[in-house]
Image (cartoon, grey):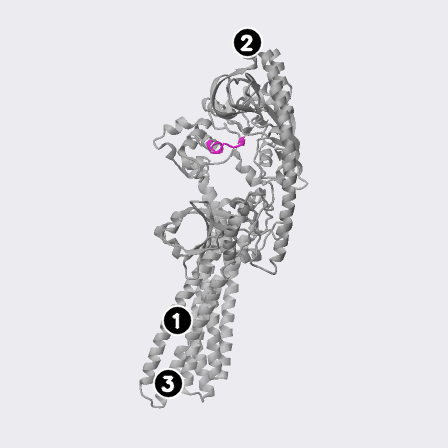
Amino acid sequence: ELDRHVVFWIESLAAAEPLELAGVPATELRLRPGQMTGSGVASPGHGVAWLAAGGMEAAFLDLADTDGHDLVPVSRDAWIRLHGEETFDCMTTAELDARRLLDEGLPGFHEILLEAESLGRRLLLVDEANLQAAQATRRRDDKARARTSLEALHSPGLRSAKDGGAMAEALRMIGRREGFEIRVPAVPDGEEPSLDGICDASALRKRKVRLRTSGRWWLGDSGAMLAVRHEDGQPLALLPGMAGRYRVADPSTGESRLADGSTSASFREVHCLYPGLTDSRADGTAGLRDLFRAGACGVARDVAVLVLTGIAAGTLALTPAFAVSRLAGAAASGVNAVPALQLAAILAGTGALVALLHILRGTALMRVEGRVAARMGALVWDRLLRLGPGFFRGHTAGELSARSLVFQDVRDQVAGVTADGVLSTLFLLPALGLLFLYDAWLGLIALLLSAAMIGVTAMFCILMIGPQQRYLETMRRLAGDTQQFLTGISKLRATAAEDSAFAAWARRYHAHKKAEIRLSMLGEHLAAFGATVPALAAAVLFSTVAVRGGVETADFLAVFTAVMVLCMATVMLGNAARAVAFLKPACDQVRPVLASPAPARRAGRARAALSGRILVDRASYAYSAGGPKVLDDVSISAKPGELVAIVGESGAGKTTLLRLLLGLERPQSGAVCYDGRDLAQLDSVFVRRQMGVVMQDSALRPGSVLDNVIGADGSLTEDDAWRALEQAGVADEIRAMPMGLHTSVGENSANLSGGQSQRIRMAAALVHRPRILFLDEPTSWLDTRSQALTMKGIEESTSTRVVIAHRLSTIRNADRIHVLHRGRLVQTGSYEELLAAEGKFRDLALRQTA
């Protein structure tokens, strides 16, 4: 009885210690009775652990030195930090009472606690003074920065020395080259903003890449990139030059040098940067104009090259007309063959020049279409990643895949043909000019003929829009259905529903092929019309000359050649009609993604390291405005390191509460807080990076076991993977497999049992040592033995653990259990307390043991 009162007294005093005095670090060593060896922050999972601290180098609450204290009580709120690898005895309060040592231990606890409290308050005063000094310095810096920015209006080259440092300047160089703006977040004095911070503030996504010498990367153009030098961590800008060779720009010195094969060896890491759509609309939506404006940034130079080479090639294409006219005139006047040889040489030179222009045009076209398609695809993916869960409930994975890849289809089917069609209009202008130069009447006839041909082409283009719309829509739905059928093929077989699935697929496929056939038919009609254009133009030209007469042979041949060039340009324009018809329906595929409101960007939101303290304060939530409440005035809490369980019948709101805790949904009233700060004011992505999450219906991805545990994190090793697998209770089973960690994981994890897949997902959540661990039905696929191993690993974890459970036997050792019923919190307590009381928990327990 005495030991329980002592434990209550120590825990109450420790919990009363103001958090701001000590903070709450992550527990690294879980204390258990007996002799132990370890280092770092140590605390027990439950109750109070007494350490024989004589001779140890340690600090109580990170404040008071334990030197001079033989016995130090440690609880979850009163931890101890072991400065080195220490070996010590750990005892329970009952053991201490049995040894008659409580009279010695309690006064020592009071003394060291008051010492820590006194030192903490003095440190708070120092922190307050430092904070006021820092605020004054920041105000001065803000004023100086504002003055510098105003002066920069008259001196564009002027930039504040504190305007982000070398990293920000390197990113500005890249932004000027690629057409996006860099925003620098506020950072404490004496620090420079990190790459992640600048990317978040500037709505940029980054991707780490590897520059291979075998690919001669320095001679291509993959866009501007950011590199970090190996020796000193200096950020560098890799900028493609006009001649197609990269230059390495150092923002700290202003120097720039050409890159070569040995350059990449000096880089520690290299990143490609992708701008996102800016939040220019208050409602969070975006339009196609925003998408095209952002996607076309940085291509002005290549577009100018494309247009200029097109005009030049179109003008040079008329050289044969001049040559024929000159040759016919010379022949009519009886001149010798010298002009013919001269004209042949001119035509040969013109042909070579036109070939060079076409090479330049093709290079510029590939750069434009590649850059625009890649950037627009990245913009759409960025948008998809930012959208809330409500958007994805109305779309299948296959459908969204088709929508996200639409700009790759635009590139494949539209870009080159459309560019040829646009350039063909540039060919029309010189040809028409030549016709009017020789004969205004023939020029007028050619102009009317061209207008008629373009009108017919436009008619076909309009007729193609409807079938193209149906073609893309049915293709998207067919992709969605096919993906679902293939994913659920085992369920279809188990329920003998193969025929129904085939019938549903056949209906989609029939509609898709019907639209495709109609589209192909219109395309063939347009091609047939294009084949008759030269003959029709020649017939009209001959008829006009026959009726009017009085046209010189040389002039007629020149006009005829120019008309053929005109026809060629018109046919090229017709070939582009189908591609143009594809453009509008393709853009319509992306409209739902752009029209759905996206959450505001995270720039300016706090990025705080979590201690593991959770509070849900009177949260209510409904899936639709005015709809029934899924959660109604729910309040729960968890201290750092606690194991908290949430139970209830199906539909009670457990998973919805988890989505609120993860920031995937926002409560309509109330708040979700971490360490006393509202999640709405925090950077939710940064918060989730400090969490481990195992959702009930999540699946392993194809790859290996190692890939599924450590993912793409290059800082993790196989040792980290084994540690996490041990903690999840599946390491022995993985070792027994022939390939171990490199065992292949197929589609739907067919070669693994459901329990193995579930524990591998749990290992993936544990591998980063998260401060908070959320587990939704963590043992639903496990047998009794595996469940015991897994729950032992969960209980020994030093993270704050929130477990949603149906099997009540898995949460016997939870610090606190919250019972939900129809969206309301109806009971809270320990397992024994709830089982002894009348209520929903006892009903659930009796139902499971009946």
Q: Which residues are magenta?
A: 763-775
Label 3 is placed on what type of residue? Ala
For numbered disc 1, what is the local secondary structure? Answer: helix
The residues tagged by marks 2 and 3 sit, at their Cα atoms, a distance apart of 124 Å
State the image coordinates of residue 322 (x, y, percent, origin top left).
Answer: 40, 81
Question: Which residue is more in the foreground, 511 or 788?
Answer: 788
State the image coordinates of residue 488 (x, y, percent, origin top left).
Answer: 46, 39
State the image coordinates of residue 795 (x, y, percent, origin top left).
Answer: 52, 24
**Callouts 2 and 3 close, C-beta under 8 Å:** no
Q: Which residue is mark 2?
A: 99
Q: Which residue is mark 1?
A: 354
Q: Which residue is painted at 45% across and 88% down in the image?
A: 549
Label 2 is placed on what type of residue? Arg
Which picture quadrant has residue 115? Answer: top right
Pair 3/1: label in front? 1
Label 1 is placed on what type of residue? Val
Q: Quadrant of the N terminus?
A: top right
The disc placed on residue 50 is: none
Give above or below for 391 relative to 248: above
Q: Which residue is mark 3?
A: 328
**Callouts 3 and 1 close, C-beta under 8 Å:** no
Q: Which residue is painted at 48% across and 84% down in the image?
A: 439
Q: Earlier in the sequence, mark 1 or mark 2?
A: 2
Give above or below for 271 relative to 246: above
Q: Earlier in the sequence, mark 2 or mark 3?
A: 2
Which picture quadrant has residue 310? Answer: bottom left
For numbered disc 3, what is the local secondary structure? Answer: helix
Residue furthest out toward the bottom = 333
